Image: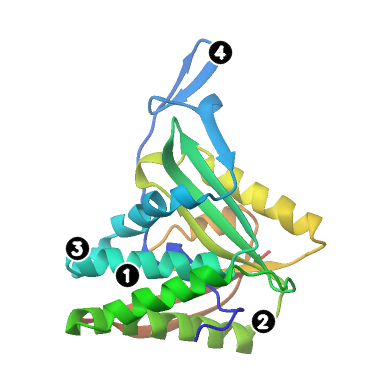
C-alpha cells in the first residue's frame, strides 16, 4: 500500500472548511479578513514547515475521533507519506504563519525522498502499539489502498495532486487558486498534460470544478473511523 503511485489527498479528510471573509480596500494593499494579500509568501517546502503543516491536518473534524496523541501521530504519518510521494511543493505563509500547501507528483519522475517513507513507517509502527493507534493505522491503510486501486482501474494519467490544504481561517482569499496555478505551471514545465486528484463530500470538492477539472468517477465506501464506521463518497477529478 506504500506504492509510489499512491494518491493522497488531504482534502479527503475535510480540511477545507468555509470561512466568511469580507474584502476591504486599504491604501495600496487589498485586505481580506485583515490579511494583506501582498504579504503572502509562496516558497518550496522546508524542514521547519513539518509541524505547522501537520497541525493543519490535525484541525479537521475527523481527528476529533482520536485522542490528541493518536491524532498527532496519525497527522505526522500522513504528512510524511505525502512528502515521500512529492516531486513539487509550495507552501503559503502569512507573516510567517503557515496557511496553505500543495504537493504534486510527476509519476514519471524517479526522484523520491526516501527518508520520509522511513519516518512514516516508524510513525505507523508507533501507532500499532495501542488499540486506538492500530485503528488509526488501519484507517490510513485502507483509505490509501482504496484510492490506489480505484485510480488504477479507472484512469491513467501522469501527474497528481498529492497534498492540498488551506488553513480554515484563510479560505476564500485566492490562496488555494494561487497554489493550484503554481502546481499547473510545474506540470506544464514537466510536459505533463493531465493530472488527477482524489477528494470526497466532506471537502470543498467544488474548488476543482471551478478550476475546470472534470469528475471522472465516484464511489462510496465505508471505513472504520476509530470505533465507529463512516461512509465516504470519493471523487476523482482530472484536468
For marks 3 and 4, the one nearer the N-term is 4
Q: Which residue is mark 2?
A: 155
In this orientation, does residue 170 appear?
A: yes
- Decide: is 99 above or below 139: above
Task: Say how the picture is coloured.
Answer: rainbow
Q: Secondary structure at mark 3?
A: helix
Q: Which mark is residue 150?
A: none
For marks 4 and 1, the one nearer the N-term is 4
Q: Which residue is mark 1?
A: 74
Q: Give the percent coordinates (x, y) of residue 237.
A: 59, 68
Do the numbered discs 3 and 4 sit on residues whose CB atoms are within 8 Å? no
Do the numbered discs 2 and 3 sit on residues whose CB atoms are within 8 Å? no
Marks 3/4: CA–CA distance: 43 Å
For marks 1 and 2, the one nearer the N-term is 1
Q: Nearer the viewer, mark 1 or mark 2?
A: 1
- How crowded is the residue under tag 1: few (<14 C-alpha within 10 Å), some, or many (20+)? many
Amino acid at each position: 500500500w506504500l506504492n509510489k503511485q499512491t494518491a493522497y489527498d488531504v482534502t479527503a479528510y475535510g480540511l477545507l472548511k468555509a470561512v466568511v471573509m469580507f474584502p476591504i480596500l486599504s491604501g495600496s494593499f487589498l485586505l481580506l479578513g485583515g490579511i494583506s494579500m501582498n504579504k503572502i509568501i509562496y516558497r518550496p517546502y522546508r524542514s521547519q514547515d513539518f509541524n505547522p503543516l501537520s497541525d493543519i491536518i490535525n484541525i479537521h473534524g475527523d481527528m476529533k475521533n482520536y485522542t490528541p496523541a493518536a491524532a498527532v501521530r496519525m497527522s505526522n504519518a500522513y504528512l510524511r507519506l505525502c512528502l515521500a510521494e512529492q516531486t513539487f511543493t509550495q507552501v503559503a505563509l502569512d507573516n510567517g504563519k503557515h496557511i496553505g500547501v500543495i504537493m504534486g507528483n510527476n509519476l514519471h519522475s524517479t526522484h523520491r525522498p526516501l527518508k520520509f517513507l522511513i519516518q512514516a513507517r516508524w510513525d505507523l509502527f508507533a501507532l500499532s502499539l495501542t488499540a486506538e493507534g492500530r485503528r488509526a493505522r488501519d484507517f490510513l491503510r485502507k483509505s490509501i489502498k482504496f484510492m490506489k486501486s480505484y485510480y488504477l482501474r479507472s484512469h491513467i494519467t501522469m501527474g497528481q495532486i498529492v497534498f492540498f490544504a488551506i488553513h480554515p481561517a484563510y479560505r476564500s482569499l485566492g490562496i488555494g487558486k494561487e497554489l493550484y496555478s503554481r502546481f499547473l505551471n510545474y506540470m506544464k514545465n514537466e510536459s505533463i498534460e493531465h493530472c488527477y486528484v482524489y477528494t470526497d463530500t466532506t471537502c470543498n470538492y467544488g474548488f476543482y470544478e471551478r478550476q475546470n477539472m472534470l469528475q471522472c468517477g465516484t464511489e462510496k465506501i465505508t471505513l472504520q473511523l476509530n470505533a465507529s464506521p463512516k461512509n465516504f463518497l470519493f471523487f476523482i477529478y482530472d484536468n
